[in-house]
């Protein structure tokens, strides 16, 4: 990752490890100066948090819910930074939000899940951020469309923003239970494959939707080598004005992070054991491919013989015989018979195809 150029950046690169994830924490919404200060002080005391999060304008799915304190909250966050010393990140959903975030020198901004779905908004935000060099976090879109997520990064990069990270917060699904949002971890793997330089931070709060599951989801995130965690934290979670069920106290976050850290060496040892077994698998796979090569050499020779004598390539009896022999062998070795039969169907298909090639080439040669 390029080193961030934002002059206000004080919190280090996003990358983290299971031993030391990059931690973003704070309330779902900034509710009052007191709540912001109390949360930040407690987080500061716990000592893990590198960046303080708080929603200022809250995109609620239904109107009539708490929609954030708006402009007032910006000054609470500035006061918090001055008094407690934590840099802060806020959500921006349009150009006006960006203008206000830059005016109060927010240390970073995040684009929410309901915004990443809309390329018009992402483009508007990217243009408004141009030249600011501010770090930007992009949450995954509400639904599992990797293109929209990647597209948001491309739009930001085109505007010269280089300090970017992804936030995995899960996906809307009618079958999300026990979670609020289905994790679909495989999408983050695909993001990592297609954009390997973008660090990925997990938001266990919005995946879980209930505080009892935060630890478990965070553990998975660490096990699959995500770089950090963005966790919703409130001094009295049950009384939070938004997302009350999923917020935890700063002290609870401290406990969870300590557990994750304690698990990290154990997981490291496990990883080593897994890697050793995989080396054995690699050796077997290599032998399998070499055997396929030898097999194909015989197929080639047979093809030439058949062509020379005008014999037909596909011989039904031989095929049934092969299938029967290998099926029985599979059973004797306690291998799934269907698995071995399917495998040989594939091997046979490509052998026949290869012999067809040999046959046609040799016929052509003879006719010339
Ligand atoms: C949030 O972080 O409070 C939020 C609104 O998240 P999301 O965009 O992931 O729903
Ligand atoms: Mn929230």
Image (spheres, rainbow, N blue to C red):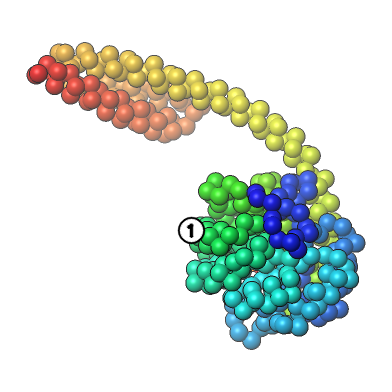
Q: Residues within 10 Å of mark 1 (few under 14, many from 20)?
A: few
Q: Nearer the viewer, residue 125 or 23?
A: 125
Q: Along the horizontal axis of the image, is 186 left or right of 265?
A: left
- The x, y position of residue 139, in whole percent, is 61, 63
Instruction: State the residue at coordinates (44%, 33%).
Output: 339
Camera-side residue: 168 or 78? 78
Which type of secondary structure does the marked residue at label 1 adopt?
A: helix
Q: Is residue 93 left or right of residue 316?
A: right
| Residue at the far left in the pictured view | 367
Answer above or below: position of 222 versus 351.
below
Q: Quadrant of residue 267?
A: top right
Q: Residue at 65% across / 57% down in the picture?
A: 163
Q: Is residue 365 visible?
A: yes
Which residue is at a point 53% across and 23% down the rendered structure image?
A: 284
Percent coordinates x, y for residue 92 in the rendering: 64, 72
Residue 318, image x, y percentages: 27, 20
Q: Measured from the top left, where is residue 230 in percent x and y?
A: 72, 61
Circle 1 residue: 147
**Residue 36 in sight:** no
Q: Residue at x 18, y 24 (%)?
A: 360
In the depicted structure, whether residue 148 falls above or below residue 78? above
Q: Nearer the viewer, residue 157 or 206?
A: 157
Q: Nearer the viewer, residue 156 or 204?
A: 156
Q: Residue furthest bottom?
A: 64
């Amino acid at each position: 990752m390029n080193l961030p150029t934002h002059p206000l950046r004080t919190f280090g690169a996003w990358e983290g490890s299971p031993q030391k994830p990059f931690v973003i924490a704070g309330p779902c919404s900034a509710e009052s100066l007191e709540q912001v200060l109390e949360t930040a002080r407690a987080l500061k005391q716990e000592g893990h948090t590198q960046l303080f999060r708080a929603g200022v304008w809250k995109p609620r799915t239904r109107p009539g819910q708490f929609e954030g304190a708006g402009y007032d909250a910006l000054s609470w966050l500035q006061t918090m930074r001055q008094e407690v010393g934590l840099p802060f990140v806020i959500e921006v959903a349009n150009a006006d939000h960006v203008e206000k975030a830059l005016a109060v020198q927010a240390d970073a901004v995040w684009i929410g899940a309901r915004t990443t779905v809309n390329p018009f908004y992402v483009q508007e935000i990217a243009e408004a951020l141009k030249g600011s060099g501010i770090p930007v976090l992009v949450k995954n879109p509400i639904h599992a469309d990797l293109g929209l997520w990647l597209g948001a990064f491309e739009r930001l990069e085109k505007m010269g923003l280089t300090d970017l990270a992804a936030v995995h917060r899960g996906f809307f699904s009618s079958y999300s239970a026990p979670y609020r949002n289905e994790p679909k971890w495989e999408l983050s793997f695909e993001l990592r494959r297609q954009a390997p330089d973008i660090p990925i931070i997990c938001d266990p709060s919005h995946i879980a939707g209930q505080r009892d599951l935060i630890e478990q989801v965070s553990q998975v995130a660490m096990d699959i080598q995500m770089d950090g965690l963005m966790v919703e934290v409130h001094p009295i979670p049950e009384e939070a004005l938004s997302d009350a069920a999923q917020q935890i106290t700063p002290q609870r976050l401290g406990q969870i992070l300590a557990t994750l850290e304690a698990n990290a060496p154990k997981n490291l040892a496990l990883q080593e054991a897994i890697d050793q077994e995989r080396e054995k698998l690699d050796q077997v796979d290599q032998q399998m491919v070499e055997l396929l090569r030898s097999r194909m050499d015989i197929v080639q020779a047979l093809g030439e013989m058949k062509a020379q004598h005008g014999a037909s390539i596909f011989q039904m009896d031989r095929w049934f015989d092969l299938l029967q022999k290998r099926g029985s062998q599979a059973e004797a070795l306690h291998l799934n018979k269907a698995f071995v039969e399917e495998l040989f169907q594939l091997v046979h298909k490509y052998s026949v195809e290869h012999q067809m090639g040999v046959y046609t080439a040799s016929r052509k040669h003879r006719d010339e």
